[in-house]
Protein backbone atom coordinates (compact mmCIF):
# COMPACT_ATOMS: atom_id res chain seq x y z
CA UNK A 1 0.00 0.00 0.00
CA UNK A 2 1.10 3.49 -0.72
CA UNK A 3 2.56 5.47 2.15
CA UNK A 4 0.97 8.78 2.87
CA UNK A 5 2.80 11.91 1.84
CA UNK A 6 5.73 12.89 3.95
CA UNK A 7 6.13 9.90 6.20
CA UNK A 8 8.62 8.10 4.00
CA UNK A 9 11.34 10.66 4.31
CA UNK A 10 13.48 12.02 7.08
CA UNK A 11 14.40 15.65 6.81
CA UNK A 12 18.01 15.14 7.87
CA UNK A 13 18.89 12.39 5.50
CA UNK A 14 16.42 13.05 2.75
CA UNK A 15 15.22 9.48 2.94
CA UNK A 16 14.62 6.64 5.31
CA UNK A 17 16.93 3.68 5.12
CA UNK A 18 14.96 0.81 6.57
CA UNK A 19 15.67 -2.78 7.31
CA UNK A 20 12.17 -3.83 6.32
CA UNK A 21 10.83 -4.65 2.91
CA UNK A 22 13.86 -6.30 1.35
CA UNK A 23 14.70 -9.98 1.47
CA UNK A 24 17.00 -10.93 4.35
CA UNK A 25 20.00 -11.52 2.09
CA UNK A 26 19.53 -8.29 0.16
CA UNK A 27 21.86 -6.21 2.30
CA UNK A 28 21.52 -4.21 5.45
CA UNK A 29 19.11 -1.52 4.28
CA UNK A 30 16.80 -0.36 1.58
CA UNK A 31 15.60 3.10 0.63
CA UNK A 32 11.88 3.76 1.05
CA UNK A 33 10.39 5.87 -1.70
CA UNK A 34 6.62 6.28 -2.00
CA UNK A 35 6.10 2.82 -0.56
CA UNK A 36 8.66 1.22 -2.85
CA UNK A 37 11.71 -0.40 -1.29
CA UNK A 38 14.77 0.37 -3.41
CA UNK A 39 18.22 -1.17 -3.28
CA UNK A 40 19.92 2.21 -3.36
CA UNK A 41 19.27 5.88 -4.12
CA UNK A 42 20.23 6.04 -7.79
CA UNK A 43 17.72 5.85 -10.64
CA UNK A 44 17.74 7.15 -14.23
CA UNK A 45 16.21 10.34 -15.51
CA UNK A 46 13.34 9.77 -17.92
CA UNK A 47 14.47 9.60 -21.53
CA UNK A 48 18.13 9.02 -20.76
CA UNK A 49 18.30 5.22 -20.87
CA UNK A 50 16.50 2.93 -23.30
CA UNK A 51 16.64 -0.46 -21.61
CA UNK A 52 15.40 -2.21 -24.76
CA UNK A 53 18.18 -0.78 -26.92
CA UNK A 54 20.71 -1.35 -24.13
CA UNK A 55 19.68 -5.04 -23.90
CA UNK A 56 20.49 -5.32 -27.60
CA UNK A 57 23.85 -3.56 -27.25
CA UNK A 58 25.07 -5.19 -24.04
CA UNK A 59 23.17 -8.48 -23.85
CA UNK A 60 22.48 -10.15 -20.51
CA UNK A 61 25.20 -8.05 -18.84
CA UNK A 62 22.65 -5.23 -18.73
CA UNK A 63 20.52 -7.29 -16.36
CA UNK A 64 23.27 -8.69 -14.13
CA UNK A 65 24.90 -5.24 -13.87
CA UNK A 66 21.72 -3.14 -13.98
CA UNK A 67 22.75 0.31 -12.73
CA UNK A 68 19.49 1.72 -11.40
CA UNK A 69 17.43 0.95 -8.28
CA UNK A 70 14.28 1.81 -10.24
CA UNK A 71 13.85 2.27 -13.96
CA UNK A 72 12.03 5.27 -15.44
CA UNK A 73 10.74 4.92 -19.00
CA UNK A 74 11.00 7.62 -21.60
CA UNK A 75 7.94 9.82 -22.00
CA UNK A 76 4.88 8.07 -23.43
CA UNK A 77 2.18 10.10 -25.19
CA UNK A 78 -1.29 9.01 -26.25
CA UNK A 79 -0.47 9.10 -29.98
CA UNK A 80 2.82 7.92 -31.51
CA UNK A 81 5.44 10.61 -32.10
CA UNK A 82 8.35 10.43 -34.56
CA UNK A 83 10.32 13.11 -32.73
CA UNK A 84 12.05 16.20 -34.07
CA UNK A 85 13.94 16.34 -37.36
CA UNK A 86 17.74 16.10 -37.03
CA UNK A 87 20.10 17.52 -36.02
CA UNK A 88 19.05 16.78 -32.47
CA UNK A 89 22.27 17.24 -30.51
CA UNK A 90 24.72 20.02 -29.75
CA UNK A 91 27.65 19.62 -27.40
CA UNK A 92 27.69 22.71 -25.19
CA UNK A 93 30.29 23.90 -22.72
CA UNK A 94 30.40 21.00 -20.22
CA UNK A 95 27.04 19.78 -21.33
CA UNK A 96 24.63 18.77 -24.04
CA UNK A 97 21.68 20.47 -25.69
CA UNK A 98 19.17 17.96 -27.01
CA UNK A 99 16.10 18.47 -29.10
CA UNK A 100 14.75 14.94 -29.40
CA UNK A 101 11.02 15.67 -29.37
CA UNK A 102 9.82 12.72 -27.27
CA UNK A 103 9.70 10.01 -29.96
CA UNK A 104 7.60 7.06 -28.76
CA UNK A 105 5.17 4.47 -30.04
CA UNK A 106 2.16 5.99 -28.33
CA UNK A 107 0.25 4.41 -25.45
CA UNK A 108 -1.00 1.36 -27.36
CA UNK A 109 2.43 0.65 -28.87
CA UNK A 110 4.07 1.08 -25.49
CA UNK A 111 1.70 -1.32 -23.75
CA UNK A 112 1.83 -3.92 -26.52
CA UNK A 113 5.51 -3.80 -27.53
CA UNK A 114 7.73 -1.93 -25.07
CA UNK A 115 6.22 -2.68 -21.67
CA UNK A 116 6.69 -6.48 -21.86
CA UNK A 117 10.33 -6.01 -22.84
CA UNK A 118 10.99 -3.40 -20.15
CA UNK A 119 9.31 -5.60 -17.55
CA UNK A 120 11.42 -8.54 -18.66
CA UNK A 121 14.65 -6.53 -18.22
CA UNK A 122 13.70 -5.06 -14.83
CA UNK A 123 12.47 -8.43 -13.53
CA UNK A 124 15.70 -10.10 -14.63
CA UNK A 125 17.67 -7.24 -13.07
CA UNK A 126 15.77 -7.75 -9.82
CA UNK A 127 16.49 -11.50 -9.82
CA UNK A 128 20.17 -10.77 -10.43
CA UNK A 129 20.24 -8.50 -7.39
CA UNK A 130 19.34 -10.95 -4.66
CA UNK A 131 15.69 -10.87 -5.59
CA UNK A 132 15.32 -7.17 -4.89
CA UNK A 133 12.86 -5.82 -7.47
CA UNK A 134 13.69 -2.96 -9.79
CA UNK A 135 10.38 -1.06 -9.94
CA UNK A 136 9.31 0.16 -13.35
CA UNK A 137 8.15 3.78 -13.43
CA UNK A 138 6.32 4.93 -16.55
CA UNK A 139 6.62 8.58 -17.57
CA UNK A 140 3.62 10.04 -19.43
CA UNK A 141 2.74 13.36 -21.01
CA UNK A 142 -0.63 14.64 -22.20
CA UNK A 143 -1.52 17.98 -23.72
CA UNK A 144 -5.08 17.90 -22.37
CA UNK A 145 -6.65 16.65 -19.15
CA UNK A 146 -8.47 13.92 -21.09
CA UNK A 147 -5.27 12.65 -22.69
CA UNK A 148 -3.49 12.62 -19.37
CA UNK A 149 -6.36 10.77 -17.69
CA UNK A 150 -6.34 8.11 -20.36
CA UNK A 151 -2.58 7.64 -19.99
CA UNK A 152 -2.57 7.47 -16.20
CA UNK A 153 -5.60 5.15 -16.14
CA UNK A 154 -3.89 2.81 -18.58
CA UNK A 155 -0.79 2.71 -16.36
CA UNK A 156 -2.96 2.08 -13.31
CA UNK A 157 -4.30 -1.06 -14.95
CA UNK A 158 -0.87 -2.61 -15.53
CA UNK A 159 0.68 -4.63 -12.74
CA UNK A 160 4.15 -4.28 -14.35
CA UNK A 161 4.08 -0.55 -13.67
CA UNK A 162 4.99 0.35 -10.09
CA UNK A 163 4.59 4.13 -10.33
CA UNK A 164 3.69 6.89 -12.77
CA UNK A 165 5.72 10.02 -13.48
CA UNK A 166 4.02 13.01 -15.13
CA UNK A 167 6.02 15.02 -17.63
CA UNK A 168 4.43 18.46 -17.32
CA UNK A 169 6.90 20.25 -19.62
CA UNK A 170 4.20 20.37 -22.26
CA UNK A 171 2.69 23.55 -23.67
CA UNK A 172 -0.96 24.21 -22.97
CA UNK A 173 -2.65 24.18 -26.36
CA UNK A 174 -4.59 27.36 -25.55
CA UNK A 175 -2.11 29.48 -23.60
CA UNK A 176 1.17 28.21 -25.06
CA UNK A 177 2.61 28.17 -21.53
CA UNK A 178 4.13 24.97 -20.20
CA UNK A 179 1.53 23.31 -17.97
CA UNK A 180 4.19 22.73 -15.34
CA UNK A 181 5.32 26.35 -15.32
CA UNK A 182 2.04 27.67 -13.92
CA UNK A 183 1.16 26.50 -10.38
CA UNK A 184 -2.60 26.78 -10.88
CA UNK A 185 -2.65 24.78 -14.11
CA UNK A 186 -0.25 22.27 -12.61
CA UNK A 187 -2.37 21.64 -9.53
CA UNK A 188 -5.44 21.04 -11.69
CA UNK A 189 -3.58 18.60 -13.94
CA UNK A 190 -2.12 16.67 -11.02
CA UNK A 191 -5.56 16.46 -9.36
CA UNK A 192 -6.94 14.96 -12.57
CA UNK A 193 -4.11 12.41 -12.77
CA UNK A 194 -4.37 11.62 -9.06
CA UNK A 195 -8.00 10.63 -9.52
CA UNK A 196 -6.98 7.94 -12.03
CA UNK A 197 -4.56 5.91 -9.94
CA UNK A 198 -3.57 4.73 -6.50
CA UNK A 199 -0.07 3.97 -7.70
CA UNK A 200 2.65 6.40 -6.58
CA UNK A 201 2.46 9.57 -8.67
CA UNK A 202 5.64 11.56 -9.31
CA UNK A 203 5.56 14.98 -10.95
CA UNK A 204 8.62 15.85 -13.04
CA UNK A 205 8.91 19.61 -12.59
CA UNK A 206 10.16 21.98 -15.25
CA UNK A 207 13.02 24.31 -14.33
CA UNK A 208 11.82 26.81 -16.94
CA UNK A 209 9.57 28.70 -14.55
CA UNK A 210 9.74 31.73 -12.31
CA UNK A 211 9.20 29.84 -9.05
CA UNK A 212 9.89 26.12 -9.10
CA UNK A 213 9.10 25.75 -5.38
CA UNK A 214 5.62 27.17 -5.93
CA UNK A 215 5.13 24.61 -8.70
CA UNK A 216 6.31 21.82 -6.40
CA UNK A 217 3.86 22.99 -3.76
CA UNK A 218 1.08 22.96 -6.36
CA UNK A 219 2.00 19.40 -7.35
CA UNK A 220 1.81 18.35 -3.70
CA UNK A 221 -1.53 20.10 -3.29
CA UNK A 222 -2.80 18.23 -6.33
CA UNK A 223 -1.94 14.94 -4.68
CA UNK A 224 1.53 14.07 -5.97
CA UNK A 225 3.46 11.53 -3.91
CA UNK A 226 6.82 12.91 -5.02
CA UNK A 227 8.39 15.48 -7.31
CA UNK A 228 11.44 15.07 -9.52
CA UNK A 229 13.70 17.79 -10.88
CA UNK A 230 15.35 19.31 -12.76
CA UNK A 231 14.24 18.68 -16.31
CA UNK A 232 16.51 20.25 -18.95
CA UNK A 233 16.90 24.02 -19.17
CA UNK A 234 15.62 25.55 -22.39
CA UNK A 235 18.61 26.33 -24.56
CA UNK A 236 19.58 27.19 -28.12
CA UNK A 237 22.50 26.91 -30.52
CA UNK A 238 23.09 28.64 -33.83
CA UNK A 239 24.50 27.15 -37.02
CA UNK A 240 27.46 28.73 -38.75
CA UNK A 241 26.88 32.11 -40.29
CA UNK A 242 26.85 31.83 -44.06
CA UNK A 243 27.55 35.08 -45.91
CA UNK A 244 25.75 38.11 -44.51
CA UNK A 245 22.63 36.27 -43.47
CA UNK A 246 21.82 35.81 -39.76
CA UNK A 247 22.51 32.21 -38.72
CA UNK A 248 19.60 29.80 -38.28
CA UNK A 249 19.06 27.63 -35.19
CA UNK A 250 21.21 24.50 -35.39
CA UNK A 251 18.74 22.10 -33.82
CA UNK A 252 15.92 20.72 -35.96
CA UNK A 253 13.48 21.59 -33.18
CA UNK A 254 14.70 25.20 -32.95
CA UNK A 255 15.41 25.13 -29.22
CA UNK A 256 16.38 22.21 -26.99
CA UNK A 257 17.17 21.36 -23.39
CA UNK A 258 20.54 21.76 -21.69
CA UNK A 259 21.84 19.02 -19.38
CA UNK A 260 25.11 17.79 -17.95
CA UNK A 261 27.63 19.43 -15.59
CA UNK A 262 26.65 22.83 -17.03
CA UNK A 263 23.33 22.69 -15.08
CA UNK A 264 24.57 21.11 -11.84
CA UNK A 265 24.62 24.29 -9.75
CA UNK A 266 21.18 25.30 -11.02
CA UNK A 267 19.84 21.86 -10.12
CA UNK A 268 21.24 22.09 -6.60
CA UNK A 269 19.57 25.45 -6.01
CA UNK A 270 16.23 24.28 -7.38
CA UNK A 271 16.25 20.98 -5.47
CA UNK A 272 17.09 22.86 -2.27
CA UNK A 273 14.28 25.37 -2.85
CA UNK A 274 11.75 22.62 -3.56
CA UNK A 275 12.78 20.35 -0.69
CA UNK A 276 12.43 23.28 1.71
CA UNK A 277 8.86 23.90 0.56
CA UNK A 278 7.27 20.41 0.24
CA UNK A 279 6.88 17.46 2.58
CA UNK A 280 6.78 14.79 -0.15
CA UNK A 281 9.99 13.07 -1.33
CA UNK A 282 12.15 14.75 -3.95
CA UNK A 283 14.08 13.04 -6.77
CA UNK A 284 17.04 15.31 -7.51
CA UNK A 285 18.95 15.35 -10.78
CA UNK A 286 21.07 17.60 -12.92
CA UNK A 287 24.72 17.15 -13.90
CA UNK A 288 25.51 14.39 -11.42
CA UNK A 289 28.77 12.69 -12.42
CA UNK A 290 30.09 11.46 -9.08
CA UNK A 291 28.89 10.48 -5.61
CA UNK A 292 29.90 13.91 -4.30
CA UNK A 293 27.40 15.55 -6.64
CA UNK A 294 24.70 13.06 -5.63
CA UNK A 295 25.48 13.66 -1.96
CA UNK A 296 25.02 17.40 -2.45
CA UNK A 297 21.50 16.81 -3.75
CA UNK A 298 20.76 14.44 -0.86
CA UNK A 299 22.14 16.96 1.62
CA UNK A 300 19.70 19.60 0.43
CA UNK A 301 16.77 17.22 0.70
CA UNK A 302 16.62 14.74 -2.20
CA UNK A 303 15.58 11.17 -1.34
CA UNK A 304 16.70 9.73 -4.67
CA UNK A 305 19.16 10.95 -7.25
CA UNK A 306 18.71 10.43 -10.97
CA UNK A 307 21.50 10.13 -13.51
CA UNK A 308 21.00 11.21 -17.10
CA UNK A 309 23.67 12.68 -19.31
CA UNK A 310 26.52 10.99 -17.42
CA UNK A 311 25.02 7.67 -18.51
CA UNK A 312 25.70 8.72 -22.11
CA UNK A 313 29.42 8.84 -21.24
CA UNK A 314 29.32 5.50 -19.44
CA UNK A 315 26.26 3.25 -19.34
CA UNK A 316 27.38 1.90 -15.95
CA UNK A 317 27.68 5.38 -14.36
CA UNK A 318 24.60 4.80 -12.18
CA UNK A 319 26.06 1.66 -10.63
CA UNK A 320 29.39 3.38 -10.01
CA UNK A 321 27.74 6.34 -8.28
CA UNK A 322 25.46 4.09 -6.19
CA UNK A 323 28.49 2.11 -5.02
CA UNK A 324 30.43 5.28 -4.20
CA UNK A 325 27.44 6.59 -2.23
CA UNK A 326 27.24 3.43 -0.13
CA UNK A 327 30.97 3.34 0.52
CA UNK B 1 26.26 -8.32 -33.74
CA UNK B 2 28.95 -8.56 -31.09
CA UNK B 3 27.74 -7.36 -27.71
CA UNK B 4 29.76 -4.84 -25.73
CA UNK B 5 30.70 -5.18 -22.04
CA UNK B 6 28.30 -3.06 -19.97
CA UNK B 7 30.80 -0.36 -19.07
CA UNK B 8 33.43 1.71 -20.73
CA UNK B 9 36.90 0.28 -20.23
CA UNK B 10 40.26 1.96 -19.80
CA UNK B 11 42.68 0.95 -22.55
CA UNK B 12 46.32 1.83 -23.11
CA UNK B 13 47.38 3.60 -26.30
CA UNK B 14 50.09 1.56 -28.02
CA UNK B 15 50.87 4.02 -30.79
CA UNK B 16 49.80 6.86 -33.03
CA UNK B 17 50.86 6.57 -36.67
CA UNK B 18 50.75 9.31 -39.27
CA UNK B 19 48.96 8.43 -42.47
CA UNK B 20 49.01 11.53 -44.66
CA UNK B 21 46.46 13.94 -43.19
CA UNK B 22 45.13 11.23 -40.90
CA UNK B 23 46.28 9.48 -37.73
CA UNK B 24 45.92 5.82 -36.91
CA UNK B 25 45.28 5.40 -33.18
CA UNK B 26 46.35 2.00 -31.92
CA UNK B 27 45.18 0.68 -28.53
CA UNK B 28 45.68 -2.55 -26.62
CA UNK B 29 42.30 -4.19 -26.09
CA UNK B 30 43.18 -7.76 -25.13
CA UNK B 31 39.89 -8.48 -23.35
CA UNK B 32 37.48 -6.68 -25.66
CA UNK B 33 35.02 -8.70 -27.75
CA UNK B 34 36.00 -9.21 -31.39
CA UNK B 35 34.27 -6.44 -33.36
CA UNK B 36 32.39 -7.22 -36.54
CA UNK B 37 33.34 -5.15 -39.59
CA UNK B 38 31.27 -1.97 -39.47
CA UNK B 39 30.89 -1.88 -35.70
CA UNK B 40 32.14 1.14 -33.79
CA UNK B 41 33.32 2.30 -30.38
CA UNK B 42 32.79 5.44 -28.30
CA UNK B 43 36.19 6.92 -27.43
CA UNK B 44 37.36 9.56 -24.98
CA UNK B 45 40.82 10.43 -23.69
CA UNK B 46 41.24 9.44 -20.04
CA UNK B 47 43.05 12.69 -19.29
CA UNK B 48 42.07 16.22 -20.31
CA UNK B 49 38.75 15.26 -21.87
CA UNK B 50 36.94 18.50 -21.16
CA UNK B 51 38.29 21.79 -20.00
CA UNK B 52 39.62 22.62 -23.44
CA UNK B 53 38.60 25.57 -25.56
CA UNK B 54 34.89 26.28 -24.93
CA UNK B 55 35.00 23.61 -22.18
CA UNK B 56 34.85 20.84 -24.74
CA UNK B 57 35.02 17.95 -25.53
CA UNK B 58 32.53 16.60 -23.02
CA UNK B 59 30.90 13.58 -24.63
CA UNK B 60 32.79 10.64 -26.16
CA UNK B 61 33.12 10.43 -29.94
CA UNK B 62 32.06 7.56 -32.20
CA UNK B 63 34.65 5.84 -34.41
CA UNK B 64 34.41 2.79 -36.65
CA UNK B 65 36.91 0.10 -35.81
CA UNK B 66 39.40 0.25 -38.69
CA UNK B 67 41.20 -2.95 -37.83
CA UNK B 68 41.46 -5.36 -34.93
CA UNK B 69 44.07 -8.08 -34.64
CA UNK B 70 46.23 -9.62 -31.95
CA UNK B 71 44.47 -7.76 -29.15
CA UNK B 72 45.10 -4.37 -30.74
CA UNK B 73 42.37 -2.16 -32.20
CA UNK B 74 42.98 0.59 -34.76
CA UNK B 75 40.95 3.75 -35.31
CA UNK B 76 41.37 6.29 -38.11
CA UNK B 77 41.29 9.90 -36.91
CA UNK B 78 41.03 13.26 -38.62
CA UNK B 79 41.27 16.46 -36.60
CA UNK B 80 37.96 18.21 -37.30
CA UNK B 81 37.04 19.55 -33.86
CA UNK B 82 37.77 19.47 -30.13
CA UNK B 83 37.15 15.74 -29.62
CA UNK B 84 39.09 14.46 -32.60
CA UNK B 85 41.86 17.00 -31.88
CA UNK B 86 42.34 15.71 -28.33
CA UNK B 87 42.36 12.10 -29.53
CA UNK B 88 44.98 12.97 -32.16
CA UNK B 89 47.24 14.23 -29.34
CA UNK B 90 47.34 10.83 -27.61
CA UNK B 91 50.67 9.06 -27.41
CA UNK B 92 51.89 5.60 -26.43
CA UNK B 93 51.04 4.84 -22.82
CA UNK B 94 48.17 7.33 -22.58
CA UNK B 95 44.78 6.12 -21.35
CA UNK B 96 41.72 5.85 -23.56
CA UNK B 97 38.14 5.21 -22.44
CA UNK B 98 36.38 2.92 -24.90
CA UNK B 99 32.86 1.52 -25.02
CA UNK B 100 32.13 -1.10 -27.61
CA UNK B 101 31.95 -2.78 -30.00
CA UNK B 102 28.58 -1.21 -30.74
CA UNK B 103 26.01 -1.24 -33.50
CA UNK B 104 25.17 -3.36 -36.51
CA UNK B 105 27.97 -4.22 -38.92
CA UNK B 106 28.18 -5.27 -42.57
CA UNK B 107 26.74 -8.53 -43.84
CA UNK B 108 28.58 -10.74 -46.32
CA UNK B 109 27.80 -10.71 -50.04
CA UNK B 110 25.14 -13.18 -51.18
CA UNK B 111 23.92 -14.56 -54.52
CA UNK B 112 27.52 -14.75 -55.77
CA UNK B 113 27.74 -10.97 -55.97
CA UNK B 114 31.21 -9.45 -55.92
CA UNK B 115 32.04 -6.87 -53.27
CA UNK B 116 32.84 -3.29 -54.20
CA UNK B 117 34.19 -1.19 -51.35
CA UNK B 118 33.58 2.53 -51.87
CA UNK B 119 35.06 4.85 -49.26
CA UNK B 120 35.52 8.60 -48.95
CA UNK B 121 37.90 10.45 -46.67
CA UNK B 122 38.14 9.27 -43.09
CA UNK B 123 35.12 7.08 -43.89
CA UNK B 124 37.43 4.47 -45.41
CA UNK B 125 38.05 3.11 -41.88
CA UNK B 126 35.35 0.40 -41.63
CA UNK B 127 36.17 -0.81 -45.14
CA UNK B 128 39.67 -1.85 -43.99
CA UNK B 129 38.40 -4.33 -41.40
CA UNK B 130 35.77 -5.44 -43.91
CA UNK B 131 38.43 -6.11 -46.55
CA UNK B 132 40.33 -8.23 -44.00
CA UNK B 133 37.20 -10.27 -43.30
CA UNK B 134 35.95 -10.89 -46.85
CA UNK B 135 36.93 -14.28 -48.20
CA UNK B 136 37.12 -13.12 -51.84
CA UNK B 137 39.14 -10.19 -53.12
CA UNK B 138 37.06 -7.03 -53.28
CA UNK B 139 37.26 -4.08 -55.65
CA UNK B 140 38.37 -1.07 -53.60
CA UNK B 141 37.55 2.47 -54.73
CA UNK B 142 38.55 5.37 -52.49
CA UNK B 143 37.97 9.10 -52.88
CA UNK B 144 39.82 11.94 -51.18
CA UNK B 145 39.90 15.72 -51.27
CA UNK B 146 43.64 16.00 -51.93
CA UNK B 147 46.95 14.18 -52.11
CA UNK B 148 47.75 14.35 -48.39
CA UNK B 149 44.44 12.72 -47.58
CA UNK B 150 44.87 10.20 -50.41
CA UNK B 151 47.81 8.74 -48.48
CA UNK B 152 45.10 7.24 -46.27
CA UNK B 153 44.47 4.74 -49.08
CA UNK B 154 47.40 2.73 -47.68
CA UNK B 155 45.01 1.53 -44.98
CA UNK B 156 43.53 -0.85 -47.56
CA UNK B 157 45.12 -3.13 -50.15
CA UNK B 158 44.93 -2.63 -53.93
CA UNK B 159 42.87 0.56 -53.78
CA UNK B 160 42.02 2.69 -56.82
CA UNK B 161 41.99 6.31 -55.84
CA UNK B 162 40.20 9.45 -56.97
CA UNK B 163 41.02 12.94 -55.72
CA UNK B 164 39.02 16.13 -56.06
CA UNK B 165 42.15 18.10 -57.01
CA UNK B 166 43.72 15.45 -59.22
CA UNK B 167 46.87 15.20 -57.09
CA UNK B 168 46.56 11.41 -56.90
CA UNK B 169 44.80 8.84 -59.04
CA UNK B 170 41.69 9.74 -61.01
CA UNK B 171 40.99 13.49 -61.14
CA UNK B 172 37.37 13.58 -60.13
CA UNK B 173 34.80 11.89 -57.96
CA UNK B 174 34.77 8.43 -56.47
CA UNK B 175 31.31 7.94 -57.92
CA UNK B 176 32.78 8.23 -61.43
CA UNK B 177 34.98 5.21 -60.66
CA UNK B 178 32.00 3.40 -59.19
CA UNK B 179 29.85 4.10 -62.22
CA UNK B 180 32.45 2.54 -64.51
CA UNK B 181 32.68 -0.52 -62.26
CA UNK B 182 28.93 -1.02 -62.27
CA UNK B 183 28.74 -0.51 -66.04
CA UNK B 184 31.36 -3.22 -66.40
CA UNK B 185 29.60 -5.68 -64.08
CA UNK B 186 26.58 -4.83 -61.95
CA UNK B 187 26.27 -8.24 -60.26
CA UNK B 188 27.78 -6.67 -57.17
CA UNK B 189 27.08 -5.41 -53.68
CA UNK B 190 28.45 -2.01 -52.74
CA UNK B 191 29.81 -1.35 -49.25
CA UNK B 192 30.14 2.39 -48.74
CA UNK B 193 31.20 4.85 -46.08
CA UNK B 194 32.15 8.49 -46.38
CA UNK B 195 30.92 12.08 -46.34
CA UNK B 196 27.17 12.57 -46.69
CA UNK B 197 27.19 13.95 -50.27
CA UNK B 198 29.33 11.03 -51.47
CA UNK B 199 27.23 8.47 -49.64
CA UNK B 200 24.04 9.98 -51.02
CA UNK B 201 25.47 9.84 -54.56
CA UNK B 202 26.43 6.18 -54.06
CA UNK B 203 22.98 5.40 -52.66
CA UNK B 204 21.22 7.08 -55.59
CA UNK B 205 23.46 5.39 -58.18
CA UNK B 206 22.95 1.93 -56.69
CA UNK B 207 19.19 2.51 -56.38
CA UNK B 208 18.96 3.51 -60.05
CA UNK B 209 20.88 0.44 -61.15
CA UNK B 210 19.19 -1.97 -58.75
CA UNK B 211 22.50 -2.80 -57.05
CA UNK B 212 22.25 -3.63 -53.34
CA UNK B 213 24.27 -1.33 -51.12
CA UNK B 214 25.22 -1.33 -47.47
CA UNK B 215 25.95 2.14 -46.16
CA UNK B 216 27.94 2.76 -42.97
CA UNK B 217 26.43 6.02 -41.70
CA UNK B 218 28.08 8.48 -39.41
CA UNK B 219 26.36 10.77 -36.96
CA UNK B 220 27.16 12.84 -33.92
CA UNK B 221 26.21 10.57 -31.03
CA UNK B 222 25.97 11.33 -27.34
CA UNK B 223 25.90 7.71 -26.16
CA UNK B 224 26.30 5.09 -28.91
CA UNK B 225 23.86 2.58 -27.40
CA UNK B 226 20.39 3.87 -28.17
CA UNK B 227 19.83 5.96 -25.05
CA UNK B 228 19.87 9.52 -26.31
CA UNK B 229 17.89 9.24 -29.59
CA UNK B 230 20.14 11.95 -31.01
CA UNK B 231 21.76 10.25 -34.01
CA UNK B 232 18.70 9.69 -36.16
CA UNK B 233 18.30 9.68 -39.94
CA UNK B 234 14.97 9.63 -41.80
CA UNK B 235 13.71 6.11 -42.45
CA UNK B 236 12.10 5.24 -45.77
CA UNK B 237 8.36 5.25 -45.25
CA UNK B 238 8.44 7.68 -42.34
CA UNK B 239 9.97 8.09 -38.93
CA UNK B 240 13.62 7.88 -38.03
CA UNK B 241 16.18 5.21 -37.30
CA UNK B 242 18.92 5.48 -34.71
CA UNK B 243 22.31 5.18 -36.41
CA UNK B 244 23.91 3.73 -33.26
CA UNK B 245 21.58 0.80 -32.62
CA UNK B 246 19.83 0.19 -35.95
CA UNK B 247 23.03 1.06 -37.85
CA UNK B 248 25.64 2.31 -38.35
CA UNK B 249 25.45 -0.05 -41.32
CA UNK B 250 22.06 0.16 -43.02
CA UNK B 251 20.72 -1.42 -46.15
CA UNK B 252 20.46 1.50 -48.58
CA UNK B 253 16.80 0.60 -49.13
CA UNK B 254 16.06 1.35 -45.46
CA UNK B 255 16.58 5.08 -45.83
CA UNK B 256 15.02 7.72 -48.02
CA UNK B 257 18.25 9.64 -48.44
CA UNK B 258 21.54 10.22 -46.64
CA UNK B 259 20.88 13.18 -44.40
CA UNK B 260 23.22 16.13 -44.86
CA UNK B 261 24.07 16.02 -41.16
CA UNK B 262 24.89 12.32 -41.15
CA UNK B 263 28.67 12.72 -41.38
CA UNK B 264 29.70 14.60 -38.27
CA UNK B 265 31.58 13.01 -35.38
CA UNK B 266 31.76 16.16 -33.27
CA UNK B 267 28.13 16.47 -32.02
CA UNK B 268 27.02 19.77 -33.50
CA UNK B 269 29.31 22.68 -34.28
CA UNK B 270 30.76 21.73 -37.68
CA UNK B 271 34.47 22.39 -37.98
Image: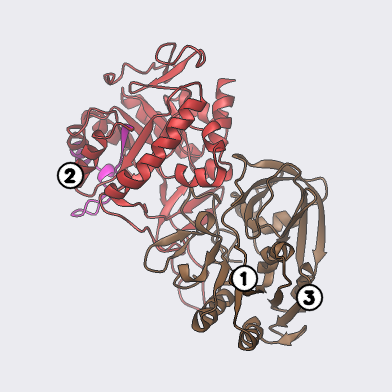
Front residue of A280/A211: it is A280
Which mark, by number, is residue A145?
2
Specify whether B94 is left or right of A178: right
> Which residue is drawn at the image coordinates 46% and 27% (left, top)?
A126
What is the letter of the red chain? A
Quote the CA–CA distance across marks 1 and 3: 16 Å
> Which residue is drawn at the image coordinates 39% and 15% (left, top)?
A21
Labels 1 and 3 in the same subunit: yes
What is the letter of the brown chain? B
> Which residue is drawn at the image coordinates 59% and 39% (left, top)?
B6
Which mark, by number, is residue B191?
1
**Picture mark count:** 3
Question: In the rendered image, which quarter contains the C terminus of chain B?
Answer: bottom right
**Label 3 residue SS:** loop
Q: Nearer the viewer, mark 2 or mark 1?
A: 1
Q: Chain of mark 3?
A: B
Q: Which residues are magenta?
A: A161-189
Front residue of A245/A223: it is A223
Q: Quadrant of residue A310?
A: top right
Quote the CA–CA distance across marks 3 and 2: 65 Å
Amino acid sequence: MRESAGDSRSREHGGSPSSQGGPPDAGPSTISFCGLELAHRVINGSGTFDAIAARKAFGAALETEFPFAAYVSKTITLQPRAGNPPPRLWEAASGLINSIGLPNKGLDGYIAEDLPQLASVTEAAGRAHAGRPVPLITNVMGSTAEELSTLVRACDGRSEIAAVELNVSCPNVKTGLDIGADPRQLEAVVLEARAQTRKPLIVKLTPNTADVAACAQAAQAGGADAVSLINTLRAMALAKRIGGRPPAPWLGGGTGGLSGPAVRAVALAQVAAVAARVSIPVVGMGGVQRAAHARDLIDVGATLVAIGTETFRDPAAGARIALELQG
Amino acid sequence: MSEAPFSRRLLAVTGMDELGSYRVLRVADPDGPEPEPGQFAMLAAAERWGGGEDERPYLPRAFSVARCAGGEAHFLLEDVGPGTRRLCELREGDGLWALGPLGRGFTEPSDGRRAILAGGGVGIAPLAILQDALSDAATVLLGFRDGARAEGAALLRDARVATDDGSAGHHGLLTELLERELQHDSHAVVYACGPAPMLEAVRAMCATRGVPAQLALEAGMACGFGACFGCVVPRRGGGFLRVCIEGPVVDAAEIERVDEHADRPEIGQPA
